[in-house]
Image (cartoon, coloured by chain):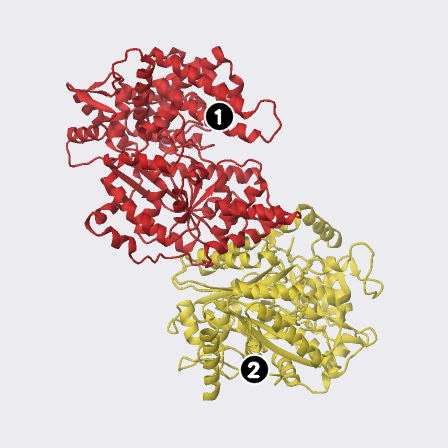
Chain colours: A red, B yellow
């Protein structure tokens, strides 16, 4: 893609790009405050009368099932061979369906009040967002789209909605939970419905599942909640969105069955994530502990720890109708009965995909960043530790930069910088320690055994990765300017179109790494240029983009933000091509990405950073886990297609690759 | 609830009287005579027996800037009560006590805030005629009646779209025809068309003038002299063939006259579009009209047996009156719906039926619109639809209620109260959701009663309760007075319009909901201060779908350009209809108002086909109203 008509700064910005910094955000209110001052029991038993959707077709959870089973679209899939299939469909629905009960909700309201008060200092919610949501729920069917960082997310969502007397959502949850005795059923009764993680070609399953969701949406049964990212992000970065469920909830609008649907992005941010070290271990290849009730009970020790405060920001409802205006022709469904499943057209798919990215961006923008995120960023750039004074100084500088870029930073204004930092460090004492005025990452001391170099390395990697997951929270803010910063270095020329070409190239390389809306390269470029210009790092001239005198620090910082990822890709690539020759696995991942990686590796050769430092390694793990995730998916999907190589084999090949890389690099640290 | 067969023949005749009314004091025996003589223009006009029901100077009896007869209009009297003037209608002279509250409550309007129309046509504002002298000379020589009076020309420059009437009320006159001609028979038309071709004059056929598609608007870009060809004087029934049950009729006859005259011979066509008081046979053919009782008699395309049309290429007609032919594409279908772009329909042979023995109204209350639609669908499925069956939504039900005349006795009002109590309290219908279907049965008395039972049995399965003949009859009255009501609204800053579509059964509910909501949303976004009236009814049922009719109106106080807002909203509503699988039009036609969607509606090739027909039939665009294509 060529950057069209390069315009000078004055006309390029302002008119086309909304100033991202001027984004106005609502104030927060702590919902736990009242919990600490009044009876939890009374709260759990209070009168609950939420405002409902104006077009609500009243129906019970059990009736819902029969509507779904009788629906034309399901009957169409069931087809002639009726009874057996119909029975199977009923069983699938039985396995899937929720059994939302107020009693269970009240139970959760009580127990979660206790738990949350123990875990968090505060749970901050934007009230204006709640009011907007209340309005939206009454007007049109609502889909809630929270970010997903923790198991806590959906419990917290229902808890907050109950607290504010809003309609309780039904939640799409993974099948993993159902295996938990008792708890699975409790979740079901609190509104969760369970879907299999993959059901590739199972038409009946798809039909039951999509009809179930669509029926609830059409009838305005309850707000529907699901996670666009599909799974909890283990890295703190938003995952590229999955469009399956989004497609389903949009279809009733496309087919004219509802006037509109409101999509409400919700950003849930944690000061300290409960699963912090669990995630790091998972990234390093330790399998995820299976969800089980006993596991949950064992995990109760986390109740004694301090997880700081958390923020839940309900974004502005996004109307599908407004989004689709001019992009989707609903009349394309005029010539086929609407219950016959139709493959979405390329236009529709592109629209849904684009919307998904936009919504994740909205989630990202409203994520609250804590001071610790800035500290983690700085500490990871100085793996040998920093003087407390330097850290304080640089954190202050970074704070100003972040604010200039429009960060939603929760930095207590009235407190001195040093105090803010020390309390942040204290909260994360499991990751950092201060000794002799120096701040460094904690590495668990092993009980004496010198032999366990490998294990020491492993532990070190755990703390680096944990730290990285906080650093990653700020990436969405810096990634676009950082891509320009790197592009300016790589381009070897200050011509704007050259810089843009490099920028665009890098953007494609990282298209699976960060949330970069497809097709928005120009907009991203302009927005980032504007930000860099605003903070005085670059000057945008007629044809050129040049670094200003004072811009050195900023640009260097931005480059180093991206550095671990660049090098991570490089390492992965080298490992794969030279030693293991698994390029073919890459090609299945994403052909263009791999080619890009290859070229990047050579383009940035000039950069003289050791490829074996801790930094890129973290990224290696991240990249790999991403890779594995998407590979396991694609192989599962391809199981249906006759193919020589089975999914199992390719999985194990990849795991061994990953392990080999880990071992090799860990030893080198 | 319905009171047994109290009304029968009386009500059917009553109704016919209602809609026909009397235009003139005419010789009672005069119009009974059915003539089959050759057209002798002067001679026939001299004959008092042929007294034209529609005068050439239409503005003598009809409003120049509003709907219908000058003597019939709604107004709020000094006490603030609504009343309907004149003597023509059942409602005439009656007080409508609840209309004011409904009006003020629905639109946020206020009787203090008036927006009166310009009282009389300012003749000097009418542009002088651009005449083609030699054409006029030759016409005169041929003995064709013509006029260039401003009143005549202005009257034929518009249909009844909101923007057209609104402009007239404000005294704004745009391009009007330069000349009005009144042919009195087929041969006159042949002459006129020949002369128009010879002198390159633009002809715009004019029938009843009830178009709601901007079809009669003079194209502003037209530089030639524009001649309005008024068919109103071609209004005779030329013959009736009782063996084949057909009648041969001149195309200028208007609906009520055709029906009345046939009735006198014991027949009817059964074609009753809502505009039948004023619309003409030729207009029905040219727009593919649909009548209220199409379930028994069929739409216009089912009713015509033979059509004669004069085009610039000559006269087009079939050679026989066979009831069905396989002779390539039916040429009638090039004529029906051609909207005056190909020629003038002069004579039509139509099917006729004996006047039905018995007629009965009825109504059914449903707890909600969904149930009502489901019932209509079932009725259509069992193919047992009465002559007419219509389903009004809740808003329209309340509207209809507001038109209830003052009740004379305490007993009636007590009975009304009782009914209301029974439906809302005993049966648990929500007064804000319930809706009403109105029915009209026709035929042998016994069969009607049997039919009625069948329909009510189906309705009961969908929670419907029979709600009496009165409600049914009032529902049908609404369609005849609605256009008069619009004029009342316009006196108080309220503007409105109706539009229609046809849609498959499975999409009826979705389409109704989405279009109504779209109207509300668009009004809000465009600064309309008070929520609009946005209401619909299902007016026709077919095997595979239904016709849906929308009313929409709003209070335009505070808007600088209300017509612009209104047009945007209507445009958005049409987009919504198309997006929801509705058609561009069921019976109003395309005109110039909906032209932009024709390609989408019939495909590029389809449009090309139509264009090539136009190209062949009328290469110099003599019929230059620029409708449709």
Question: Residue A195 bears which disc, if any?
Answer: none
Q: Residue B358's x, y, as percent?
A: 68, 81
Q: How many marks?
A: 2
x and y percentages locating residue B333 in the rendered image? 74, 58
Marking on residue A2: 1
Residue B325 image position (x, y, % from top left): 82, 60
Whether residue B110 is visible here, answered yes or no, is yes
Q: Say which quarter of the image contains residue B16.
A: bottom right
Which of these two is toward me, A180 or A664? A180
The answer for how far apart the CA atoms under marks 1 and 2 are is 74 Å
Classify A16 as above or below B157.
above
> Residue B90, labelled with which disc?
2
Residue B497 image point, x, y percent: 52, 64
Query: Which type of secondary structure does the marked residue at label 2 adopt?
Result: loop
Q: Chain of mark 2?
A: B
Tell me which residue sits at (47%, 67%) in the image: B433
Q: Nearest the camera: A571 or B159? A: A571
Q: Residues within 10 Å of mark 2 (few under 14, many from 20)?
A: some
Q: Judge whether A379 appears above or below B92 on screen.
A: above
Is B415 positioned to the left or the right of A556 in the image?
right
Category of crowding for the residue at label 1, using alpha-carbon neighbours closer than 10 angstroms: few (below 14), some (14–19), many (at least 20): few
For the point 57% across and 29% down, which residue is it?
Answer: A638
């Amino acid at each position: 893609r060529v950057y069209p008509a390069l315009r000078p700064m004055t006309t390029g910005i302002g008119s086309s790009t909304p100033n991202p910094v001027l984004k106005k955000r609502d104030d927060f209110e702590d919902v736990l405050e009242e919990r600490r001052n009044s009876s939890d029991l009374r709260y759990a038993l209070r009168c609950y009368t939420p405002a409902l959707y104006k077009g609500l077709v009243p129906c019970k959870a059990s009736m819902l099932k029969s509507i779904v089973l009788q629906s034309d679209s399901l009957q169409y899939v069931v087809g002639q061979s009726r009874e057996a299939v119909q029975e199977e469909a009923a069983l699938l629905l039985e396995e899937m369906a929720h059994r939302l009960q107020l009693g269970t909700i009240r139970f959760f309201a009580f127990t979660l009040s206790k738990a949350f008060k123990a875990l968090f200092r505060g749970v901050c919610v934007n009230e204006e967002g709640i009011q907007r949501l209340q309005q939206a729920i009454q007007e049109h069917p609502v889909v809630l789209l929270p970010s997903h960082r923790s198991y806590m997310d959906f419990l917290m969502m229902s808890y907050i909605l109950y607290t504010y007397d809003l309609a309780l959502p039904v939640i799409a949850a993974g099948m993993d939970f159902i295996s938990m005795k008792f708890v699975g059923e409790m979740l079901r009764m609190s509104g969760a419905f369970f879907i299999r993680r993959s059901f590739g070609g199972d038409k009946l399953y798809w039909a039951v599942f999509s009809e179930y969701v669509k029926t609830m949406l059409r009838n305005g049964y309850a707000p529907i909640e699901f996670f666009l990212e599909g799974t909890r992000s283990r890295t703190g970065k938003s995952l590229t969105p999955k469009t399956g469920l989004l497609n389903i909830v949009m279809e009733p609008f496309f087919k004219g069955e509802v006037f509109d649907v409101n999509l409400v992005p919700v950003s849930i941010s944690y000061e300290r994530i409960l699963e912090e070290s669990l995630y790091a271990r998972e990234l390093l290849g330790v399998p995820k502990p299976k969800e089980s009730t006993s596991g949950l009970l064992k995990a109760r020790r986390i109740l004694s720890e301090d997880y700081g405060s958390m923020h839940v920001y309900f974004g502005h409802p996004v109307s599908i109708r407004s989004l689709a205006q001019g992009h989707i022709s609903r009349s394309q469904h005029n010539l086929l009965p609407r219950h016959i499943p139709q493959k979405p057209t390329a236009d529709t798919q592109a629209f849904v995909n684009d919307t998904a990215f936009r919504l994740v961006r909205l989630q990202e923008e409203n994520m609250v960043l804590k001071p610790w995120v800035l500290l983690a960023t700085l500490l990871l750039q100085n793996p040998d530790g920093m003087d407390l004074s330097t850290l304080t100084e640089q954190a202050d500088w970074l704070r100003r930069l972040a604010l200039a870029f429009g960060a939603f930073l929760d930095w207590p204004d009235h407190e001195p910088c040093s105090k803010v930092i020390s309390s942040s460090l204290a909260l994360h004492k499991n990751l950092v320690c201060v000794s002799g005025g120096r701040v460094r990452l904690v590495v668990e001391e092993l009980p004496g055994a010198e032999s366990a170099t490998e294990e020491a390395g492993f532990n070190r990697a755990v703390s680096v990765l944990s730290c990285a997951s906080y650093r990653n929270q700020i990436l969405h803010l810096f990634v676009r300017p950082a891509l320009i910063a790197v592009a300016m270095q790589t381009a070897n020329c200050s011509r704007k179109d050259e810089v843009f070409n490099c920028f665009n190239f890098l953007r494609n390389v990282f298209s699976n790494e960060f949330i970069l809306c497809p097709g928005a390269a120009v907009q991203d470029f302009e927005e980032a240029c504007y930000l860099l210009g605003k903070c005085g790092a670059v000057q945008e001239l007629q044809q050129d983009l040049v670094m200003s005198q004072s811009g050195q620090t900023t640009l260097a910082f931005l480059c180093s933000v991206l550095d671990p990822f660049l090098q991570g890709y490089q390492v992965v690539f080298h490992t794969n091509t030279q030693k293991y020759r698994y390029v073919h696995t890459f090609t299945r991942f994403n052909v263009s990405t791999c080619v890009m990686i290859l070229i990047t590796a050579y383009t940035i050769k000039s950069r003289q950073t050791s490829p074996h430092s801790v930094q890129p390694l973290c990224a290696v793990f991240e990249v790999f886990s991403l890779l594995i995730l998407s590979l396991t998916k694609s192989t599962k999907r391809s199981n249906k297609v006759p193919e020589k190589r089975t999914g199992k084999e390719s999985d194990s090949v990849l795991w061994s690759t990953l392990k080999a890389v880990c071992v090799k690099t860990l030893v080198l640290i | 609830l319905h009171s047994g067969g109290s009304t029968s023949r009386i009500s059917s005749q009553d109704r016919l009287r209602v809609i026909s009314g009397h235009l003139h004091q005419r010789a009672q025996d005069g119009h009974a005579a059915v003539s089959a003589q050759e057209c002798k223009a002067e001679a026939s006009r001299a004959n008092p027996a042929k007294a034209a029901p529609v005068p050439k100077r239409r503005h003598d009896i009809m409003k120049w800037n509003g709907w219908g007869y000058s003597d019939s209009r709604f107004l709020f009297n000094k006490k603030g009560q609504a009343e309907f003037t004149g003597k023509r209608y059942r409602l005439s002279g009656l007080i409508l006590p609840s209309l004011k509250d409904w009006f003020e409550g629905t639109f946020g309007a206020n009787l203090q805030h008036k927006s009166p129309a310009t009282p009389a046509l300012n003749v000097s504002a009418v542009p002088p005629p651009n005449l083609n002298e030699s054409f006029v000379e030759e016409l005169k020589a041929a003995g064709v009646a013509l006029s260039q009076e401003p009143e005549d020309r202005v009257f034929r420059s518009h249909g009844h779209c909101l923007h057209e009437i609104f402009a007239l009320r404000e005294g704004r006159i745009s391009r009007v025809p330069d000349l009005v001609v009144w042919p009195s028979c087929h041969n006159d038309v042949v002459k006129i068309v020949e002369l128009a071709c010879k002198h390159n004059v633009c002809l715009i056929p004019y029938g009843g003038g009830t178009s709601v598609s901007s079809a009669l608007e003079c194209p502003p870009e037209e530089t030639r002299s524009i001649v309005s060809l008024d068919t109103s004087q071609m209004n005779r029934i030329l013959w009736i063939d009782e063996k084949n049950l057909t009648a041969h009729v001149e195309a200028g006859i208007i609906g009520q006259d055709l029906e009345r005259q046939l009735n006198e011979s014991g027949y009817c066509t059964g074609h009753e579009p809502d505009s039948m008081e004023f619309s003409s046979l030729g207009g029905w053919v040219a727009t593919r009209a649909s009548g209220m009782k199409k379930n028994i008699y069929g739409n216009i395309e089912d009713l015509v047996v033979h059509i004669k049309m004069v085009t610039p290429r000559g006269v087009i007609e079939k050679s026989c009156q066979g009831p069905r032919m396989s002779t390539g594409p039916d040429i009638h279908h090039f004529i029906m719906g051609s909207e005056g772009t190909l020629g003038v329909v002069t004579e039509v042979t139509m099917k006729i039926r004996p006047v039905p023995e018995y007629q009965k109204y009825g109504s059914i209350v449903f707890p909600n619109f969904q149930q009502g639609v489901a019932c209509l669908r079932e009725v259509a499925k069992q193919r047992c639809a009465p002559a007419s069956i219509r389903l009004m939504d809740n808003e329209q039900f309340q509207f209809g209620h507001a038109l209830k005349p003052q009740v004379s006795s305490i007993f009636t009002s007590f009975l009304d109260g009782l009914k209301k109590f029974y439906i809302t309290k005993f049966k648990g219908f929500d007064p804000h959701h319930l809706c009403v279907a109105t029915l009209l049965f026709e035929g042998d008395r016994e069969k009607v009663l049997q039919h009625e039972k069948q329909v009510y049995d189906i309705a009961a399965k969908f929670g419907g309760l029979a709600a009496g003949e009165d409600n049914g009859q009032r529902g049908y009255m609404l369609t005849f007075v609605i256009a008069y009501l619009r004029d009342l609204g316009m006196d108080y800053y309220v503007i409105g319009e109706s539009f229609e579509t046809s849609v498959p059964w499975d999409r009826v509910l979705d389409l109704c909901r989405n279009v109504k909501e779209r109207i509300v949303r668009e009004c809000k976004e465009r600064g309309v201060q008070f929520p609009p009236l946005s209401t619909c009814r299902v007016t026709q049922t077919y095997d595979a779908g239904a016709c849906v009719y929308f009313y929409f109106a709003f209070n335009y106080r505070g808007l600088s350009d209300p017509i612009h807002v209104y047009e945007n909203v209507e445009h958005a509503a049409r987009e919504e209809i198309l997006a929801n699988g509705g058609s561009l039009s069921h019976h109003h036609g395309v005109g110039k108002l909906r032209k932009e969607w024709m390609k989408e509606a019939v495909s590029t090739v389809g449009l090309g086909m139509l264009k090539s027909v136009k190209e062949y039939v009328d290469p110099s665009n003599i019929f230059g109203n620029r409708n449709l294509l």
